[in-house]
Amino acid sequence: MFKEGEKQHEVGGKLYDRISSVGRTLEDYGIKEGIEYAFAQWAAGVAVDIIECAKTGEQFNRRTVSEQFDGWVYEEMDVRTWSPESIKKYIARHPRNMLQAAADRGTITHMVLTYADQYGWPAPEDVGHLVEDWMSSGKWLCDQEETALCMAHLCLWAQEHNPVMVLVETPIWSHDLQVAGRADWYAVMGEELWLLDVKTRASVSGPRVEQVIQLGGYLSCDKALGKDGQEVDAPLVTKAGALVCAPDGANLYEVQELEKWKTMFKKTLDLKRATASVAGMTKGHGKCSLDLGRMLKVTA
């Protein structure tokens, strides 16, 4: 009934847009896309230079790129003075690696939620051992210590607020919008049924607008995958929020005006599909999709 994909999910044999990719449309086609793309190309080249110099012991000269980007001039650096950890952190700052690191932290978050649903919440002081065990195999770009701290604060928050778990990692979708995703956590707190979207950050702060739009997408879904593998009605929530977990703490940010954010999601979805359509029709003609993204304004 539900098959997860990288960019689209399959629901009943049909491909639906992945909800988590829709909120990023504002960044993908926003004004800063050109800057991020240009930096990504430069950073990739620098990362390759660093690796090669580390192998040969030659001096690494951070090349001047002012001829490509006005005002971007960098000082010379000698990679031989760098520690392996410094090189690792420098390469990790590549935008694509940062995105993958965030995705890896999200995967660990889902593993903690699933563990808590099956066995109960681990003690905050013990969750680090779980994270270490999970990350001992495979390739992970997220920092293990920081990730463990985020998960410890998630567990501590759960102990303090004692939410009753209803559903975890639940596939949900909307046939009308043709979107699908996995809802992190349905929980009862007080007498309210909450939809909680768990996010990890470098420090505790409110969710970004694209993350709230993503939550609006989950709220727009009216169908879910039942325990028997069949389609059922999605839980009807009365509250929703982003539970932000960081190395320095965790905090739940309630999202107000839920209908507004459902509308924002639908308009952003229209933008994503419009830009994808134009990009396909104008393939090979440069920045047509980016220009359209700049011109279109998404407002509630």
Image (cartoon, helix red, strand yellow):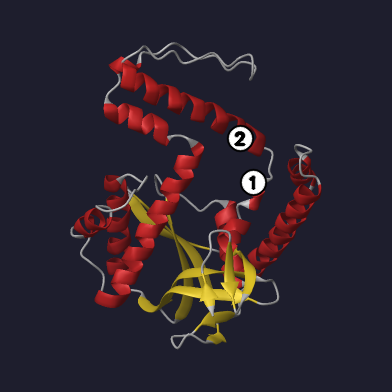
Q: Viewer-proximal residue, 102 or 67? A: 67
Image quarter hosting the N terminus: bottom right
- Report the amino acid beneath label 1: Asp
| 1 and 2 marks in contact (CB < 8 Å) | no
Which element type, helix, strand or loop, lies under badge 2?
helix
The residue under the point 45% across, 47% down is 100
The residue under the point 78% across, 41% down is 288
Q: Which mark is residue 10?
A: none
Q: In the displayed structure, would residue 124 be above or below residue 120?
A: above
Look at the image and tell me whether residue 297 can be seen. no
x, y percent for residue 196: 46, 68
The residue under the point 73% across, 53% down is 276
Q: Which mark is residue 28?
A: 1
Look at the image and tell me whether residue 21 can be seen. yes
x, y percent for residue 202: 40, 44
Residue underneath mark 2: 37
Residue 92: quadrant of the picture = top left
Q: Viewer-proximal residue, 23 or 82? A: 82
Q: Viewer-proximal residue, 48 or 213? A: 48
Q: Residues within 10 Å of mark 1 (few under 14, many from 20)?
A: many
Q: Earlier in the sequence, mark 1 or mark 2?
A: 1
Q: Residues within 10 Å of mark 2 (few under 14, many from 20)?
A: some
Which element type, helix, strand or loop, lies under badge 1?
helix
Is 291 left, or right, of 132 in this rendering?
right
- Report the amino acid beneath label 2: Tyr
x, y percent for residue 143: 32, 44
Is 123 left, or right, of 162 in this rendering?
left
Is 146 left, or right, of 96 in this rendering?
left
Q: Residue furthest front?
A: 56
Q: In the displayed structure, would residue 292 be above or below residue 240?
A: above
Q: In the displayed structure, would residue 97 be above or below residue 150?
A: above
Numbered-mark total: 2
